[in-house]
């Protein structure tokens, strides 16, 4: 257990907290929590002492103990627990059905610590994870998803999924798969050749409406329509590869049980890895007239579309068939938030930042429209995806979000 100091974070940029906002009495407690399938996750509990309500934050791919909302919840009188996924930043192992067991482990830990109320706080990909969890936890056990999209048993029908008392969604993108499908470059001709391009679908061709950054591009309705259809088709092609790979592996496993053929053994044990290039090309990031908001030019990965689309860093860069189908396929994934949100009955607060360049009004509205909770609040605040000012002199959305969430939480759980 340690006390907070100004050196507890590397900075205040992006999604990091401002150390000056931490109460002087803040303490941190590190823990390990066991999941129902034998995995173990690391967690950090921030508290001042005497809190009866705890917020829980988690992301399926990232660890966020220094998230900017930690001081906000502490100042609101709540403890804040952040939990790591079982495999940080590793898309090769990320299957959302298993991640639900991690969420359950975190809620159970907080209940065992004696907190009377637990409020899930999902930011970005954490929102779609928590939405999927709530959908499944609110169902009778026998109605829960029994198998992953790749056919693995989920154990969700055999384990306890404890319910939280409320949920806050901040910058809730529509699910990893839908986010990626909106960002895929559909001019990719061959997944094994990142340079081969269908020029009729090239988002960076002046002939299709692209203009040199930071000038906003101007894509025609006809091009946007063809582009969106081709994005879906690219996902469908990768789905086909993934399902064929799984089918081959399962068939070899069955044959090996009867034949003991060493070749079948090798095939049944082999899990191929696909490298997905050019995954940062959402037209809305380059043509600001498409679904206009207060966003700046560029994507979450930066304002240079060539670097973010062709470079080594990006969403879903390396996947297995199983992780692709469960997490990154906008067609096959069970974690599509517009669908999972229909199962949420807990008091819910949804916050969208109007300068977000990865989440757009139509997507948030679809999520909000699907939530059946009678206690539902939806607010739009200034700021980028992490609530930081889009331009110098703009309001700090993180501060505004903190004030809003503090009021919302105190009204319901104080």
Image (spheres, helix red, strand yellow):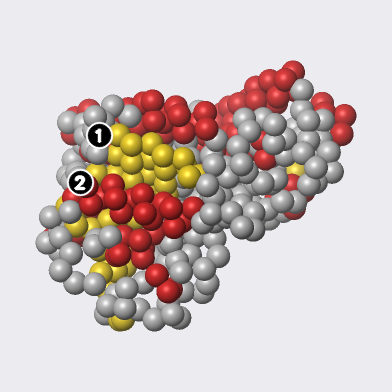
On the image, numbered disc 1 is attached to which residue?
375
Check contact, mark 1 vs mark 2: CB within 8 A. Answer: yes
For the residue pair 147 and 70, the one nearer the viewer reads as: 70
> Residue 46 in the image: x percent, y percent?
29, 69
Q: Is residue 381 above or below residue 145?
A: below
Taking the spot 58% from the left edge, 45% from the top edge, the residue there is 355
Q: Between marks 1 and 2, how big is the CA–CA gap?
A: 10 Å
In the image, taking residue 251 as reference, residue 180 lies left or right, namely right
Q: Position of residue 168 (x, y in %)?
A: 33, 46
Q: Residue furthest right?
A: 207
The reply to whether residue 126 is in sight is: no
| Dot placed on the residue nearer the N-terminal end, 1 or 2 | 1
Q: To which quarter of the image does residue 169 belong? A: top left
223 relative to 36, above or below: above
In the displayed structure image, the side of residue 217 where residue 262 appears, left or right = left
Q: Residue at x 25, y 34 (%)?
A: 375
Q: In which quadrant will I find the C terminus?
A: bottom left
> What percent of the width, then of the height, locates residue 60?
42, 51
The residue positioned 31% from the left and 78% from the top of the image is: 24
Q: Which mark is residue 364?
A: none
In this image, 410 relative to 286: left or right? left
- Label 2 CA crowd tier, 10 Å (few <14, some 14–19, many 20+): few
The answer, for residue 353, to whether it is visible in the render is: yes
Q: Secondary structure at mark 1?
A: loop
Give the quarter of the figure containing the N terminus.
bottom left
Q: Work out whether residue 396 or residue 264 is closer to the camera in this orientation and state it.
A: 396
Local secondary structure at mark 2: helix
- Left or right of 59? Residue 408 is left
Q: Residue at x 68, y 20 (%)?
A: 225
Residue 412 is tagged as: 2
Which one is in front, 119 or 243? Answer: 119
């Amino acid at each position: 257990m340690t006390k907070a100091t100004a050196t507890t974070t590397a900075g205040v940029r992006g999604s990091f907290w401002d150390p000056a906002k931490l109460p002087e009495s803040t303490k941190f407690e590190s823990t390990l929590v066991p999941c129902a399938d034998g995995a173990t996750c690391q967690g950090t509990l921030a508290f001042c002492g005497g809190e009866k309500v705890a917020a829980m934050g988690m992301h399926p791919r990232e660890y966020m103990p220094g998230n900017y909302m930690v001081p906000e919840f502490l100042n609101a009188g709540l403890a804040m627990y952040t939990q790591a996924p079982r495999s940080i930043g590793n898309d090769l192992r990320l299957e959302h059905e298993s991640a639900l067991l991690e969420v359950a482990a975190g809620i159970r830990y907080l209940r065992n610590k004696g907190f009377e109320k637990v409020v899930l706080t999902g930011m970005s990909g954490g929102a779609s994870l928590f939405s999927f969890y709530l959908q499944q936890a609110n169902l009778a056990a026998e109605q829960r998803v029994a198998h992953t999209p790749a056919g693995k048993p989920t154990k969700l029908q055999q384990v306890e999924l404890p319910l939280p008392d409320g949920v806050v969604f901040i910058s809730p993108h529509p699910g990893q798969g839908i986010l990626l499908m909106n960002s895929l470059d559909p001019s990719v001709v061959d997944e094994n050749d990142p340079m081969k391009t269908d020029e009729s679908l090239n988002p960076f061709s002046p002939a299709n409406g692209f203009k040199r950054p930071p000038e906003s591009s101007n894509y025609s309705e006809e091009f946007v329509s063809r582009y969106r259809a081709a994005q879906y088709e690219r996902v469908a092609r990768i789905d086909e590869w993934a399902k064929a790979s799984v089918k081959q592996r399962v068939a070899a496993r069955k044959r090996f049980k009867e034949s003991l053929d060493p070749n079948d053994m090798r095939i049944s044990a082999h899990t191929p890895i696909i490298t997905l290039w050019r995954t940062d090309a959402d037209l809305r990031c380059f043509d600001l007239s498409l679904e206009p908001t207060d966003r700046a030019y560029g994507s979450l990965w930066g304002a240079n579309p060539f670097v973010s689309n062709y470079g080594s860093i990006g969403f879903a860069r390396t996947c297995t068939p199983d992780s692709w189908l469960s997490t990154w396929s906008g067609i096959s994934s069970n974690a599509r938030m517009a669908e999972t949100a229909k199962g949420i009955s807990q008091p819910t607060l949804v916050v969208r930042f109007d300068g977000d360049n990865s989440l757009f009004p139509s997507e948030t509205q679809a999520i909000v429209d699907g939530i059946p909770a009678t206690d539902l609040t939806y607010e739009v605040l200034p700021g980028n995806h992490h609530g930081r000012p889009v331009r110098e002199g703009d309001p700090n959305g993180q501060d505004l979000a903190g004030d809003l969430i503090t009021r919302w939480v105190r009204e319901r759980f104080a």
